[in-house]
Every structure is written in structure tokens, then in C-alpha cells.
Amino acid sequence: MAGRMFATVALLAIASTSSWAQDMQTKYSREAMQQALETRERYDIHGLRFDISTSTLRPGTEAILDDIATALKNFPEWGLRIVGHTDTSGNAETNQKLSLARAEAIKAALVGRGIDAGRLQAGGVGQTMPVASNDSGAGRALNRRVELVRTTDSAEAKKLLKAMTDYLAGQKAMSFSYDSNLQVVTNSDQKLGLASSGTVVLNRPDKVHTSRSGGFVDSEALFDGKTLTLLGKNVNKYTQVEIPGTVDHLIDELKDKYGLPLPAADLLMTTAYDELMKGVYDSKDLGSGVVNGTECDSLAFRKDDVDFQIWVAQGAQPYPCRLVITSSQVKGGPEYSVQISNWKSGDAVAPGDFGFKNTTNAEKIDVSDLKHNLGDLPENFMVGDKK
């Protein structure tokens, strides 16, 4: 996800995923499997055994495969994603390949039982999504599993998202205000929301001006096609980095090299559709909704690590009105939301000022020294269990 905004949510694990396994049942039940797919849309199976370090199914798994095939035949509208998981024994890259090969083996077994291959997806995530500690044999056994995920593939949802991203990519100039909320989960399962607001002005291909302010941050970013200026207004310090190129290139450089994503970064790229859809295995068109008085199409998408829902304005200007990203792999589901207002495009956009004028005599410092004042979390928060 992973995109710039998606990575923020996926990494906010202020609670340990190992606690997920406390109530986990490993005993397979046909009724539980079918009920889970009917209601919760996912089910972990530990009864599908493979030979060690191979994707060869062991004898004795036939009955489970028959049950899965029967459920799919009874519900022909279902799609199914098969996801392989491993423990941490062995090499991470090898485990990822092995988990995918095992999911492919199960898919092939279901096709052999008369299920249309078009209804099935295979994925492997190796050891990256444990549900228990790998420090014990019992925990490793819980992590070695096959996850069944019921899926929906809405062509209309994809069509509406593509129309939105094509519209955004085609705008030479656009501006908007936004309100964001970053919801984190503490070790004691308390949900805390960190709110901020800001503005974005973009002129393609190579100019952008953003601002963000809240209780823990007050920052500004200006890019004139050559130089990026990051200003920490709350500390009256700034830094400058030479990153000549387009806004797309700037977004990638900020994320990959400096770990400083721009607000709503995935939506600003000309390749927004590809960024948003990377890794998506489930898509839904949820019908109409209203955001800030604007009627929108409500669309929902799922990836392995995050879910995201987006509301797109109906009509000739299909701009994004609201985006919500939720971690699906962290207890409590940390969430990041952006609500957009004052949308303008084309000639309606006021001329932007993309050059930095140091009117407050801010001190110039290295980017690494300013970074902690521009992040998503204040200093008294940290990933882990210490603060």
C-alpha cells in the first residue's frame, strides 16, 4: 500500500500482533469455515498440511479441500483468495515464495474439483503477518496457516476510481483544503485521534505548495521544480533539498529517501490509479454517500495490510471528497482519514507561490534535524510499548 499514506497506517502498531492468537482455535470445522466466509469473509485453516519446505499437500487434506469446493459451489457469487503464511523458520525470501507456491497448490486442487480458476486468487505473504510469537512451537504452529478470504470484484468500483484518478491526473492546476485524523491504538487498547488541517496547491508538472497544522505540527512544504523547502513553523527552522523533476518524482523521493510523505500524496500522482490499486484483491461499490453536502460514490478496497474507502464526487468533476485507510493487520485497526473541502481546479485555482521567502528569519538546518518536527506522531508517541 504500499503507497505513502498506506505505509503510515500499516506501521502504527502500538500494540503487539502476538496478542491476536490468545483465543485462536486451530481445529478445523466445515461449519465454522462456511459461516466465517458467509459473515466475516475470512477464515484461517491449519489442517492443510504440506511436506516440509515444499508445496506438496500431504495425504489427509482431501476432505478439507472438498469442503471448500462445496462451499464455493453452493455460493457461486463468491470469489476466494487463498493466502499462504509461514513461521520465521528459514529465510524470509524463501518463505515468501514457499507461501505463494502452497497457495497456488491449493488453488490448483480446487480447480481440479470443478471451481472456475477466475473465481480464485492465490497470494503468499511468508512470515510477515504472524498471529502469534515465533518464539515457541505453539506460536509457530499458529503462524503456519492458510487464510481463506472471500472476495468481491466490482468492475464498477474500479471504473469509478479510474475515472477519478484520470480526472486528477488531467488537471494542470488544483487546490484544496483538508482535515486529517490519525487514529492510533495504545498498549491498553485506547484509541487516540491526532487531528490536523492543511492546504494543497499543485501546478503540474513540477510545482506544489502544502501546509499542515495541528496540536503537534505546524509545517509548510514548497517545491518550485528544482528545490524543496521544508519549514517547521512551530520551531522556526527550515531545510532545503535539491530534487529537480516532476511532482511525481518529488513524492517518490520524499517517501523513499527521506520518509516524509506529502499530504494526500497518492492522490496527487499522475499514476494514482496504479498506486492505489497495487495489491488490491477486493473491490466494492457501496452506492451513494454525502460528504460536506456533496453527493459521492462510496468505494471500498482491500489489500493484505490495509483497507481503504474513498468517496468520489459525482458529476463532471469526480474529485476525492474523503479517504479512510485502516490497518487490517494490527489489533484495533489504526486508521488515517483525510476529508477534502474547497476543491478547485483549472482557472479557479488562485496563482500559487512556490518559492520560499524567509520572512521570519528561520534557521536553516539539515533535513534529518527537522524531520522529527514534521512527522505524523508527536515526540511523546513512538511505535512500540515504551511511550
Image: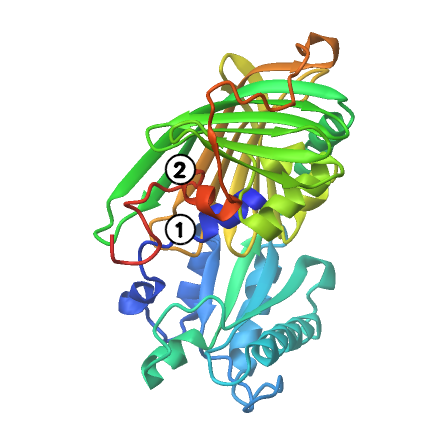
Q: Tell whether 10 sits left or right of 386.
A: right
Amino acid at pointer 2 = Leu
- Label 2 sits on a secondary structure element that is strand
Residue for badge 1: 12
Between 104 and 47, the residue placed more toward the observer is 104
Measured as percent of width and height from the top left, residue 138 is found at 33, 82
Going from N to C along the chain, the mark reached first, 1 or 2, is 1
The residue at the point 66 percent across, 10 percent down is 350
- Say if 44 sits above or below 342 in the image: below
Residue 154 visible? The answer is no
- Say if 159 sits above or below 349 in the image: below
Amino acid at pointer 1 = Leu
- Say if 52 sits above or below 190 in the image: below
Measured as percent of width and height from the top left, residue 132 is found at 35, 71
- Label 1 sits on a secondary structure element that is loop
Tell whether label 2 touches label 1 (CB within 8 Å): yes
Measured as percent of width and height from the top left, residue 260 is found at 53, 43
Between 116 and 343, the residue placed more toward the observer is 343
Q: Tell whether 270 sits left or right of 358.
A: right
Residue for badge 2: 182
The residue at the point 37 percent across, 42 percent down is 377
The residue at the point 58 percent across, 55 percent down is 75
Query: Which quadrant of the figure has residue 173?
Result: top right
The residues bearing labels 1 and 2 have C-alpha atoms spaced at a distance of 10 Å
Q: Which mark is residue 338?
A: none
Q: Check disc 1: other Cα within 10 Å, few if <14, some if 14-19, many if 20+.
A: many
The residue at the point 54 percent across, 91 percent down is 52
